[in-house]
Amino acid sequence: MVKGQPITILLVEDEPAHAEIVKRNLADFRVANRIVHVADGQAALDYIFHKGVYADPAGSPTPDMILLDLRLPKVDGMEVLKRIKADDKLKHIPTVVLTTSAAETDIVKAYGYGAGSYLVKPVDFEKFTKLMDTFGFYWLAWNTFPQ
Amino acid sequence: MKNTDNIAGKDRRFRAVAIVCVAVCAAVGIVALLGWFFDVPVLSSFGTGKKPMGPSTAVLLILFAFSIFARVQAPKNGKIKFAAACIVLFIAAACVSLFIASSSGIFLHIEHLGLPIPHLQDGIPLGHMSKVTSLGLPFAAISYLLLLFSSKKRPWLADISWVLSCAFIFVGITLALSFAFGTPMLFGDILILPSAPSTVAFFSLGLAIFHLALPRTWLFRDRTEHAYFSYYILTLTFIVISSAFITGGYVYLRAYEKHFERQIENQLEAVAKLKVLNVSKWWNERLGIATVFHDNEIFAELVEKYSEVPENVQAKRKLEQWLEKTKGIHQYDGLILFDSMGGVTIELPHKHPGIPDKIKEKIPEALKSDKITRMDFFRDTPDSPVHLAIMVPVFDRLDKRPLGVLVFIIDPTDYLYPFIQRWPAPTDTAETLLVRKDGSDVLFLNDLRFKENAALNLRISLIHDEVPAVKAVTGVSGIVEGIDYKGFEVVAYILDVPGTDWSLVAKMAKSELYAALRERMFGVSLLIVFMIFNVGIAIAFVWRQQSLSFYRERYLLTETLRESERRLRRAEEIGHLGHWNYDPEMKTVSLSDEMISIFGLPPGELNTSPEKMFAPIHPEDGNALMKFVAEIVSKGKSEIQCRIIGPGGALRYITGIAEMNRLYEDAEAYTVFGTALDTTELKRAEIELKEKNDELMRFTYTVSHDLKSPLVTIRTFAGYLQKDIGKQDAERINSDISYILNASQKMSRLLDELLQLSRIGRIVNAVTEAPFQSVVAEAMKLCAGEIDKNKVEIIVTQEPAALFGDIRRLIEVFQNLIDNSIKFMGSQPSPEIQIGFDVMNGNKVYYVKDNGAGIDNRYLSKVFDLFEKLDPSTEGTGIGLALVQRIIEVHGGKIWVESGGVGKGAIFRFTLPNAELKPEQGVRS
């Protein structure tokens, strides 16, 4: 594609099926991208802040972008988003919310906390695939990340 | 507020009448003074020749009137009250000293205020206060002083004042009557009656005090305005009717008195005339007999014969026989024939007690005269008998030579005195006098009823012209009044006896004359008193009827009021709306019972200060309170929403509204009326509603998210499946199908559980009773498989307790909690669950405690959320604890979880207030 640089995406998704969908779709982009999947909010925070099992920064590189579900066990997505955007070193990481919730309050809140984009999971295969394609193109092909 | 207005209104009307009366009193005084100053007597006496009002009386009356006027105009002014009391006291003191002075016969010059007024007129002191006035005014002063110092605490002072004023009015009426109908009834001049102007002033003064006192008396206390008027009319009616009776009685007595006097005059006149007639007839008879012997030739011849030849026995016998006969028939005391030398020739009776010297002295004179000589009443000495005598000279027929004198001696005690003294009717004091002028005296000729031996001995100087006898000899005749020789007041009829220089006085003591009149007066007075008493009873009866209807009305009113008050109290209680009223003048707030209960103030303290009332308001609402108070004053109305810290620190929410009431349109005075609505329940419900709403929103959010999620999976993997089938990628096809199956299974389970959750509270099973232990045992039975599999030891408390409620649901609570604990046992080698309850603050707190994985404190609040799974790897959808929470909530309880942290076990605690009471006692969930 335009840029051959591999980027790390942190996928925070409690539903394994949904994680699979994302992975499958992004796998279509033949880029050596790395998708790190965590299943709950606490794990996501631990990863980003290098805590617990993710204490070694080498094993868990800081993601270039975060794909975040809102409804998560333990710590919900909104809290995770808030914590990331409150950290000076991490707030630059583009965070895209990908969730089933189309609730206006969630949308407003997410943007308020500094979400870069808000995507609602469509209940339609074609649309979901198209969304993921467009997402992949936009973020993985065209978007430039800070070094 | 309204009540005081009414009283003020009533008072105002009475005061107006009082002011008119006082003005009349003052006007009379001023007019009298002007009369004195400008020498117009009619102004100070209301009639020429009548007794005038003294200048002193006028001044005191004006002062009195002024003090009442000033007081009525400024009823609230304490200084004026004091001044009025001082003036009235001064008046009383002045009157009393004048009374004492005049009683001792001293008439102070100062009473004339320096005016040139003679001290006496017709023997009556002029320009001085009468004794009645000087006694009456202090009474009026006392009456007014009592009224001045009467108050709500001493209402009886006003009562006495009113009674005194009534008495004063009656005295005024009686005095006025005496002026209207003639002389006063009281005989004699012991009392110098007040003048006509004084009487008018008295009457108006009494009327003024009457009107001022009446509204404060027992008659008018606690009356409604309607009753007030009718009672006033009743009181006036009583006074008018009583006055009419007094007037009627007075007029009747006056008429009777006149009639009686005429009767007495007639009686006296008749007696006098009869006696005069008889006396004169008797005297003429005496003279007539004497005349027979005068110029009687036969008698003269006999006397001559006898005198020439004294031995002529025959002649002597003849003479004696004749004279004897004459004496016998005409009852002379004696007949004496004197010869020309003055010697006694014949003396009849033969042994006459002695010829009075006065006769002997007169003989020579009689011999010289050729006429009959009358000798009036005479006596030789004050103790010798009284006689009258007629001397008849006897002459020689031829040479007119005196032969002797025949003397007829008359003893008045024989006939005249008894006749004169006789009275046609029995009497104690009546008598008749025969008097004659003797020099500068009047001489009493007969013996008197009340004075021994008075005839010719008693004489009274003519100077004493009040004595009827004196009047008689100074040319007065007819009916006269005067004082007799005894000093008694008498009425007399005077008549001269014709042919003599005697006057006859028929008299009777006034005391006897008027005794009958007095008796009549006493009877009439008694009758009047009796009639007034009867009128009083009649009025009292009407009054009683009025009072009864008044009290009935008031009772009904009170009942209605009480009922409406009760309803208000109840309405306030039910509506949690209290009210209060602030009086800035008193600086007190009166509170309704509900107000007290809302504010948690000490019960029964219906009046308190604003500070105390506001004290329970939450300090954080202080600014709102200040704004509230400021707005009441500036805008006249204000509203506040604030919190109150009740007893025991319980918070209450209230909404207060207050408005300012101006008492009078133009005055500054105001009160503040306010209400306080206890909105705590509303607030609580609001909060609860908000919580429920939030929960509902969370629920729908969760449900929509969690239900959508498998749907997304199914649709997406179905798409993949389609593609993969096209590619014939068997591995992917299997994977896709398994995703789809998983998702649909999950969805179906979610739907089942949602249904289950929605049933709680919606479908209510019958409330039954079960022992705590059996509920737990039932739950354990349902989890038996898991318990056995994980070798969990469960310890249940043996303390007895009973649970009431939807037992099936309560079993579910324990089942889910046990299930949950087992699920999160972690790597615990000897899993153990304890189930029991503690008692905290008198409430049971149940617990299910495990020694498993524990919960990270950060997640404690999330464990009960719907479909919340702290560990995605565990089984289940995460509805268990949400279900538990819902069941507990339905039983009125709360659930929470405590944990020492990861690996330190967890303890779920919950309360079940509605499950601890028997259904009859408790609130059904």
Image: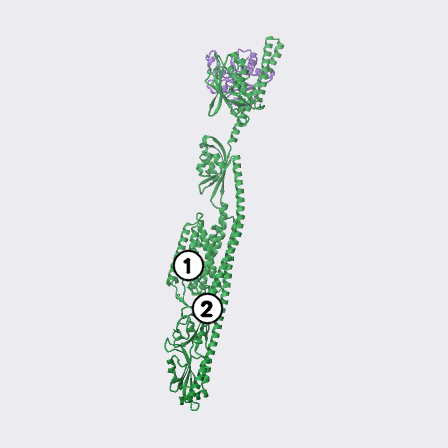
The amino acid type found where label 2 is placed reads Thr
The secondary structure type at the circle numbered 1 is helix
Q: Position of residue B899 (x, y in %)?
A: 47, 18
The amino acid type found where label 1 is placed reads Leu
**In the image shown, does B115 or B841 lie closer to the viewer?**
B841
- Classify mark 1: residues with Cα within 10 Å, few (<14), some (14-19) or many (20+): some
Q: Position of residue B631 (x, y in %)?
A: 48, 38
Q: CA distance from mark 1 to mark 2?
A: 39 Å
Check contact, mark 1 vs mark 2: CB within 8 A: no
- Classify mark 2: residues with Cα within 10 Å, few (<14), some (14-19) or many (20+): few
Q: Position of residue B223 (x, y in %)?
A: 50, 48
Residue where numbered disc 1 is placed: B135
The reply, left or right, for residue B120 in relation to residue A109 is left
Is residue A36 in view from this perspective?
Answer: no
The secondary structure type at the circle numbered 2 is loop
Chain A: drawing colour: purple
Residue B720 shows which numbered tag? Answer: none
Residue B427 shows which numbered tag? Answer: 2
**In the image shown, does B586 or B699 lie closer to the viewer?**
B586
**Picture quadrant where residue B703 is located:** top right
Q: Quadrant of the C terminus of chain B?
A: top right
The reply, left or right, for residue B439 in relation to residue A83 is left
* Eye-nearest disc, 1 or 2: 2
Q: Position of residue B722 (x, y in %)?
A: 62, 12
Residue B320 lies, with reference to residue B151, above or below; the image says: below
In this figure, what is the number of numbered marks? 2
**Picture quadrant where residue B130 is located:** bottom left
**Chain coloured green in this rendering:** B
